[in-house]
Amino acid sequence: MSPLNIEKGSSSHSAYDLRSHLSDEIESHTLAILVSNEAGVLARVIGLFSGRGYNIDSLTVAEVDHQGHRSRITVVTSGTPQIIHQIKMQLERMVPVHEVSDLTVAGPHVSRELSLIKVTGKGEARVEALRIAEIFRANVVDSTLESFIFEMTGPPEKIDAFADLMRPLGEVRVARTGVAAMARGL
Amino acid sequence: MTEMTGAKMVVEALKEQGVDTVFGYPGGAVLPIYDEIFQQNEIRHILVRHEQGAVHAAEGYARSTGKPGVVLVTSGPGATNAVTGITDALLDSIPIVVLTGQVPTFMIGSDAFQEADTVGITRPCTKMNWLVKDTNDVASTIHEAFHIATAGRPGPVVVDIPKDVQFATGEYTRKPKQSPSHYQPRVKGDAEIITALVDAIEQAERPVFYTGGGVINSGSGASQLLRELVDATGIPITSTLMGLGAYPASGKNWIGMLGMHGLYEANLAMHGCDLMICIGARFDDRITGRIADFSPNSRKAHIDIDPSSINKVIHADFPIVGDVGHVLEDLLRIWKSRGRKTNAAGVQKWWSQIEEWKKIRCLDFKNSETTIKPQYALQRLEELTKGNDRYITTEVGQHQMWAAQYLGFEDPHRWMTSGGLGTMGYGFPASVGVQIAHPDALVINVAGEASWLMNMQEMGTASQYRLPVKQFILNNERLGMVRQWQELLHGERYSHSWSEALPDFVKLAESFGWKGIMISDPKDLDDAIMEMINYEGPVLFDCLVEKHENCFPMIPSGKAHNEMLLGEAETQGVIDSKGSVLV
């Protein structure tokens, strides 16, 4: 935010040039938002996204500090760098929001998602499903003669990959929790 | 240990917050609070005729005093009627506390009579809102509401109180000395960036101050500091519609309002400057025109208490988050301590360029002997009222822009208009609120007949409380601004932009016990205005004006500052120096 470290030539100090220098590329960012756990706070946060036309790719929310009445909302959102910046600023000025951290910018972080994946099929396909599940370290949590439910935790891409591999084997249904994420280290 | 009913807590909390006036309208779900209001004399309740009027009146009160406005309405339709006013206050950053009644907690969600999801409906149009479900929380929530409404960037808040919570008893919480809220916006700007800005001010050849409503919201101290800074540096200053009066119109560095209907010299100064110092304004689309060509050769400083305003639309080279008053104080101190330097030669050359632009006389218009030109009416109004203790409100449209162009404002808090939301029907109830706050002042609502009709029911309020508000209606029997856009952009197809079946305003005035004045001859104008000013009660001034006048200068939507339409000045061929437009 300091004017003193603006790259020379990158800003000829006009909106016009600024735009052409700024990337129009859509980036995906994971934001961790610490909020007061009070009535309507989730509606307030997601209302900001819908009201201002921002994207929500994934959303999780749960209380993380019972005594302090704090909940943590993890949002995966996408947009141009300028939009992402504006989303953070808009979130930060909301009264019940205590802290917004952009895990994507902050450095290495871990993101995990829990999924339940039901695959229906018979014969050889069942065996193949089990074999793939083993490779992905997915657990069987329910089984009938014509179906399995696998439980798997991992980064979202891993779940996508697993579900894609299952699709040729039978009808696939997926339930996912959305991403929970945290910065690495101290 | 003070136990009392929730309803009594409401009144006690308002008293503790120093509230002297509440604008409201009773109904089933707020009856316990009204009962408490009945039994005390410290807080004056003003009965409006529509809840939208209550919020606009509270806005007028707030804008003209610098104190938060307070509104009390019932559940359901009472709350939904208030939504337009609440949104208006959000867009213009006006501190308003709206108390709404709600159906009893055990009936919420049952589609009860006059039930609406008030916190759900008002969530996107408030700074914050609360549904109070426990009587013990009533007082603390109201104290928090006042803190949120006024701290940082001001705005409207809603406190929704179910009827059973009003009836039940609980423990009253006194107003805390220091708000326990974690919401404590930063007011001091970054000293390093302020110093960098001082450095830029010292060197700039073509600097300009671009100020907005944030200066006024920051308090009268901020306006004083602004005046000192501008006069000491000799830098030209322009302002948005919302910021008029922060720097006096008679001040030597004033170059007029900027923006879509701003002055030629102000917009070209914005386009041609090499250093733009934006103070408490937000680069609204009415200000910037086409973003891509907005002030292409300038470095930009942006002072704003709301970090989300900075870099939202326009990149700021000097982003300074803080309260205008605090930042200006630091800026002045640092600038003085470094020897009060400016690039005098450059700034002098810049001024001679601005003087060239002024010669265009962009506000010139072709006057008429037979028809009252709206611009002429406002020129005369200015001339005949400027010495008074005067407050101006407006509705929305051409008359609003002409009022901003032709009236001069010497002080903050004297000009109340709906800038961000552009709410037709704002001005009349706002004038009611202003007059309540300033009983002896001359309060004039400059209106168009179409806007004015939108909240004309408030005539009853003015009559009841003997408010001598002057409704100065520039009646062109048209939705003038809509008509102008249809003429310029929609092939002169005037779709539904005329006012059919207008009332006889004089008879309407008389039916409410007001004075009505109707004039159409320019020769009668001065006498009629004097008659209006000198009359002790409310006046409905029906000024029949030229029906097809357009408002110029105008930056058409999506055009840049140097692509202004100039109207009469242009047609009179006095635009020879147009070639010198581009700096």
Image (cartoon, coloured by chain):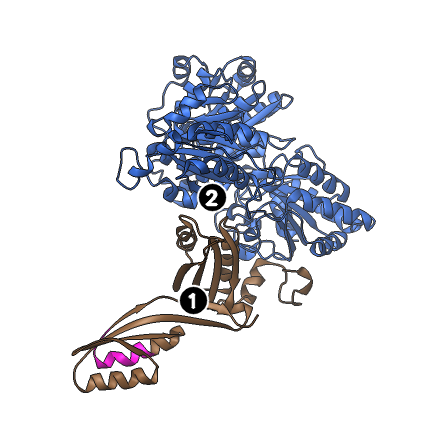
Chain colours: A brown, B blue
Q: Within the image, what quadrant is residue B196 found in?
A: bottom right
Please tell me the numbered disc located at residue B128: 2
Of residue B415 and residue A28, the one placed in the foreground of this image is A28
Depth check, front residue: A1 or B10 = B10
Disc 1 residue type? Ala
Is residue B157 visible to the viewer in this orientation of the structure? yes
The residue carrying mark 1 is: A180
* Magenta-drawn segment: A162-172
Residue name at image x 20 percent, y 84 percent: A125
Helix, strand or loop status at disc 1:
strand
- Queried whether the magenta region covers residue B511, the answer comes back as no
**Image x and y of residue B273, in percent:** 66, 52
Identify the image quadrant of the C terminus of chain A.
bottom right
Label 2 – label 1 distance at C-alpha: 27 Å
In x, y percent, where is residue B111? Answer: 26, 39
The disc label shown at residue A95, or none? none
Above/below status of B261 relative to A155: above
- Report in which chain the residue with disc 2 lies: B
Is residue B340 visible to us here?
Answer: no
- Residue type, label 2: Met
Q: Quadrant of residue A175?
A: bottom left
Q: For this view, does B483 lie left or right of residue B339?
A: left
Dominant secondary structure of the residues highlighted in magenta in the image? helix
